Amino acid sequence: MGVSEFMLQGAKKSLIEWLRQQGITDENVLHAFDVVERHKFLEQTNTILLGRAYENTPLPIACGQTISQPLTVAFQSQLLQIRPDDTVLEIGTGSGFQAAILAAMGAKVFSIERQLELFRKTRAKLTNTLKVSNVFMHYGDGFEGLPNKAPFDKIIVTCGAPNVPAALLQQLKVGGIMVIPVGDGVQQMHRITKVGENEFNAETFGEFKFVPMLQKTVKVNS
Ligand code: SAH
């Protein structure tokens, strides 16, 4: 049996109310969750997955990766303090959902994915099917960032980083903010503010669990 549009819309509204109760107070984030519909970023033929689109759970996408859980996406988006026309670098495009949320909040988003197959699928979907504007995808290794588009107002890492990559600190504007989960297995959410050319302030926001940030690009899924 299919998943009805009526049911999905109801589940979406409930999720947004729940996010509010969990401390997501940035109306810009909550509005983006209304406009950018998570079910559209899942495999459209899989009705079991579609039926779970608005649960607070990570769900499988292509290449053994996952779309992050909604509260994590909302939490990271809120920590970034997005202002209209911010230029944001995202590491770990995955399904493109987080990138689309930031674009709906008014940012211009550059997003890097290391898996070629996933990069191609998501780029085709965002461009041809969902017609998301202001998201520019790059196939590459996020540890290197995107030097020719730098500096960025904001940087968001959506995979578990073993450390804070030096290239990313460098590519942040002075006054800019990076939100990055750091750690092996379980990560501590960090918000790093660049207060001077070589000066940073760090805050932490509790434990999260992401797929790992891995070195180098991959052409074939293993
Ligand atoms: N933001 C995504 C979450 C995807 S999961 C979403 O909204 O769906 C994290 C993604 O990071 C995976 O697709 C993984 O392949 C990618 N990734 C891991 N290490 C990376 C790296 N070094 N550079 C770029 N992408 C990376």
Image (spheres, rainbow, N blue to C red):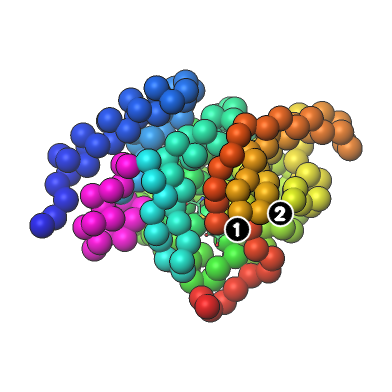
Amino acid beneath label 2: Pro
Q: Give the residue drawn at x 42%, y 66%.
A: 62
**From the image, which quarter does the N terminus lie in?**
bottom left
Residue 212, which numbered label? Answer: 1
Q: Give the vertical position of 55 relative to 174 (above or below).
A: below
Amino acid beneath label 1: Pro
- Give the percent coordinates (x, y) of residue 189: 63, 38
Q: Is residue 210 visible?
A: yes
Q: How many discs mark residues in the rendered view?
A: 2
Q: Give the vertical position of 25 relative to 87 (above or below).
A: above
Report whether 123 appears left or right of 177: left
Query: Foreground residue, 29 or 124?
Result: 29
Q: Give the residue drawn at x 46%, y 68%.
A: 63
Magenta segment, which residues?
40-55
Q: Give the residue drawn at x 71%, y 54%.
A: 162
The residue under label 2 is 162
Q: Is mark 1 within 8 Å of ligand 1?
A: yes
Q: Quadrant of ligand 1?
A: bottom right
Q: Are marks 2 and 1 in contact (CB under 8 Å)?
A: yes
Q: Which residue is farthest right?
A: 198
